[in-house]
């Protein structure tokens, strides 16, 4: 029984290796470096042996699927072939030679090492298991390719060979390859470089700290008018995704958090624009951008229409007609958007987003506009109402700070938002507060 199991494992491994070679032949039709759908990933092909030659490697991961490379660094020899991969943590000059023939060219996957991605993964790994003490950083290290790494490489190459999967799935599969390296034999040696990157992302300079905390605290504007972002608990205290993000940002700054609670998006914008708060949470809009520096979106929310059950309006495209009145929350993202977008329908403004449906019923208007979750809750509360299918806009919820705080502070806020998206913090907050119908925004381009 034991030998049979071993043979099966070897056969499986050999089949995977052969499939990787087939895929690399397609991805690398020419000698040299071949570009892929991902800018940080290239495929190297060499049809001939190369004698020992001085080279300079940038930080990266080299996974050889056919052929063999040998690197000479001082008196040390590094072999990376179909059974090993090489990781380079800092730019390093060394000598290299290659074994390859036209019949069996060298085929290798080269990943430029993105320390921001690696740092995000280190943070996630450390959240779920005890962090191992880092080893002294090593500029080069060769390690065996285990079954998990081989499977991850095969999945990645399959995705790169299919345009749709290359665009949609390959970035996530690339993160899996980073994960395999960071949790493998080389993880502890790469960790010091990742920790340095984490410090650059997370640690504010004195000028950044001063920009965000002119009163000695971080004052965060919290809008209770958007149920996706925040609400009040039984004791009347603010809680929700934006409160969690504000707390995490204050923790990164190392200061006390003070919440400035309002009941409408427009009021939240005014509080930040007038510098009564240092950061806020609201939808990106060019009008608001006059005085506020936005991060990229951290959450995407749908803006929808609601009508009475017996309304003749059946589709979003039918809303913008002269007889129709559309109720919006004053100063909300959809107020700003529909003010620009609607050409024929009349806009009526309710004091806050939570009172939109009340105003809609009181005035006898034809349409109410708002966040899907709020409208669904109001439809259940009143009855006799329905939402139109689809959405009229995607609301990009972001963080913002007064532009007067300077470009350095704005850039730090941008990095913070990207990091909490990538680390899973935002997704965890949505799940913790049982928020449905909202999704984590993709990484900024």
Image (cartoon, rainbow, N blue to C red):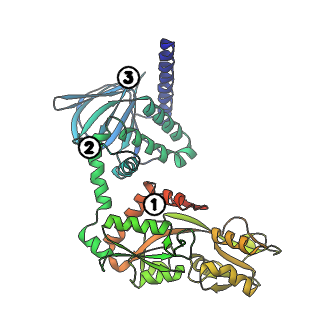
- Residue 381 — which label? none
Q: Tell me if 318 is positioned left or right of 238 in this view.
A: right
Helix, strand or loop at mark 3:
loop
Q: Nearer the viewer, residue 95 or 144?
A: 144
Q: Nearer the viewer, residue 31 or 12?
A: 12
Q: Nearer the viewer, mark 2 or mark 1?
A: 2
Helix, strand or loop at mark 1:
loop
Q: At which x and y percent is residue 264?
A: 54, 80
Q: At which x and y percent is residue 30?
A: 43, 35
Within 10 Å of the Cα at label 3, are there few (<14), some (14-19), or many (20+) other Cα atoms?
A: few
Labels 3 and 2: the sequence-earlier one: 3
Distance from disc 3 to disc 2, alpha carbons, whole Å, reads 40 Å
Q: Nearer the viewer, mark 3 or mark 2?
A: 2
Q: Is residue 282 above or below residue 141?
A: below
Q: Nearer the viewer, mark 1 or mark 3?
A: 1
Q: Write down the residue under mark 3.
A: 101
Check whether the beta carbons of the residues at disc 3 and disc 2 lie within 8 A of each other.
no
Q: Can residue 194 be seen at all in this image of the molecule?
A: yes
Within 10 Å of the Cα at label 1, are there few (<14), some (14-19), or many (20+) other Cα atoms?
A: few
Q: Write down the residue under mark 2.
A: 134
Q: Is residue 166 above or below residue 80?
A: below
Q: Nearer the viewer, residue 70 or 384?
A: 384
Q: Quadrant of the C terminus?
A: bottom left
Labels 1 and 3: the sequence-earlier one: 3
Name the residue at 21% across, 42% down.
136
Distance from disc 2 to disc 1, alpha carbons, whole Å, reads 30 Å
Q: Write down the residue under mark 1.
A: 444
Which quarter of the figure has residue 419?
A: bottom left
Q: At which x and y percent is residue 326?
A: 69, 81
Which quarter of the figure has residue 140?
A: top left
């Amino acid at each position: 029984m034991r030998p049979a199991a071993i043979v099966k494992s070897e056969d499986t491994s050999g089949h995977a290796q052969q499939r990787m070679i087939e895929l690399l032949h397609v991805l690398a039709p020419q000698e040299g470096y071949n570009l892929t759908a991902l800018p940080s990933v290239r495929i190297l092909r060499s049809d001939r042996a190369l004698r020992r030659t001085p080279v300079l490697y940038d930080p990266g991961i080299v996974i050889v699927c056919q052929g063999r490379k040998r690197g000479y660094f001082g008196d040390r020899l590094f072999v990376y072939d179909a059974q090993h991969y090489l990781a380079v943590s800092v730019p390093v000059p060394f000598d290299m030679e290659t074994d390859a023939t036209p019949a069996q060219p060298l085929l290798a996957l080269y990943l430029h090492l993105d320390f921001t991605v690696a740092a995000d993964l280190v943070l996630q790994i450390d959240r779920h298991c005890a962090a191992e003490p880092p080893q002294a950083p090593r500029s080069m290290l060769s390690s065996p390719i285990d079954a998990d790494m081989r499977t991850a490489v095969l999945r990645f190459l399959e995705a790169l060979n299919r345009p749709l999967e290359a665009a949609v799935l390959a970035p996530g599969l690339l993160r899996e390859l980073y994960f395999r390296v960071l949790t493998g034999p080389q993880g502890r040696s790469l960790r010091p470089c990742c920790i340095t990157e984490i410090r650059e992302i997370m640690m504010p300079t004195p000028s950044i700290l001063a920009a965000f905390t002119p009163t000695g605290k971080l004052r965060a504007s919290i809008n209770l008018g958007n149920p996706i972002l925040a609400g009040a608990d039984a004791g009347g205290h603010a809680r929700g995704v934006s409160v969690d993000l504000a707390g995490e940002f204050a923790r990164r700054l190392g200061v006390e958090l003070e919440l400035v609670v309002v009941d409408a998006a427009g009021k939240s914008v005014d509080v930040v624009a007038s510098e009564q708060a240092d950061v806020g949470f609201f939808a990106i809009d060019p009008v608001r951008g006059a005085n506020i520096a936005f991060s990229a979106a951290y959450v995407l929310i749908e803006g929808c229409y609601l009508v009475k059950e017996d309304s003749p309006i059946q589709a979003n495209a039918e809303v913008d007609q002269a007889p129709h009145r559309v109720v919006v929350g004053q100063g909300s993202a959809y107020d700003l958007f529909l003010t620009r977008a609607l050409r024929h329908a009349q806009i009526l403004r309710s004091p806050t987003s939570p009172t939109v449906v009340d105003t809609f019923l009181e005035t006898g208007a034809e349409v109410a506009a708002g966040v899907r979750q709020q409208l669904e809750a109001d439809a259940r509360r009143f009855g006799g109402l329905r939402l139109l299918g689809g959405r009229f806009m995607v609301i990009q919820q972001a963080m913002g700070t007064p532009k007067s705080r300077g470009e350095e502070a704005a850039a730090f806020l941008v990095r913070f938002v990207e990091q909490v998206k990538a680390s899973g913090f935002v997704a965890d907050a949505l799940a913790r507060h049982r928020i449905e119908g909202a999704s984590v925004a993709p990484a900024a381009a």
